[in-house]
Image (cartoon, rainbow, N blue to C red):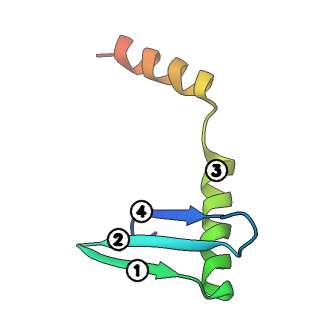
Amino acid sequence: MDGPFTLLAPRGRGEAVYTEIQGHARLITDPDEVRLFSERYGIVRAQALTPRESLMLIKKMLGEL
């Protein structure tokens, strides 16, 4: 990933992506580019822990300090 992004899905319109890297903002509306970001988001989301799992991991790591 090149940096943070925000996937926008307004009602009644196509998705868009907002990125801001080193002070340069960009709004992406091209469907092919947006699809790539949407796929990246799906991959990250699929690998993320649930809130409960995250809390358990944090508590475990704090106990190891």
Q: Nearer the viewer, residue 20 or 42?
A: 20
Amino acid under disc 2: Glu
Dot in front, 4 or 1: 1
Amino acid under disc 4: Pro
Dot in front, 1 or 3: 1
Q: Which residue is mark 1?
A: 26
**Quadrant assignment, res 64:** top left
The reply to whether residue 2 is in sight is no
Q: SS of the residue at dot 4?
A: loop
Q: SS of the residue at dot 3?
A: helix
Distance from disc 4 to disc 1, alpha carbons, whole Å, reads 12 Å
**Quadrant assignment, res 12:** bottom right
Q: Which residue is mark 2?
A: 20
**In the rendered view, would you say 12 is above or below 57?**
below
Task: Kindly give the residue lying farthest to the left in the view shown.
Answer: 23
Are the two marked residues, 1 and 2, in contact with CB atoms closer than 8 angstroms?
yes
Are the two marked residues, 2 and 4, in contact with CB atoms closer than 8 angstroms?
yes
- Disc on the earlier residue, 3 or 2: 2
Q: Which residue is mark 4?
A: 4
Distance from disc 1 to disc 2, alpha carbons, whole Å, reads 6 Å
Q: Which residue is mark 3?
A: 45
**In the rendered view, would you say 12 is above or below 46?**
below
The crowding category of the residue bearing disc 3, from other C-alpha atoms within 10 Å (few below 14, some 14 to 19, many at least 20), is: few
Are the two marked residues, 3 and 2, in contact with CB atoms closer than 8 angstroms?
no
- Disc on the earlier residue, 1 or 2: 2
Q: Which mark is residue 38?
A: none
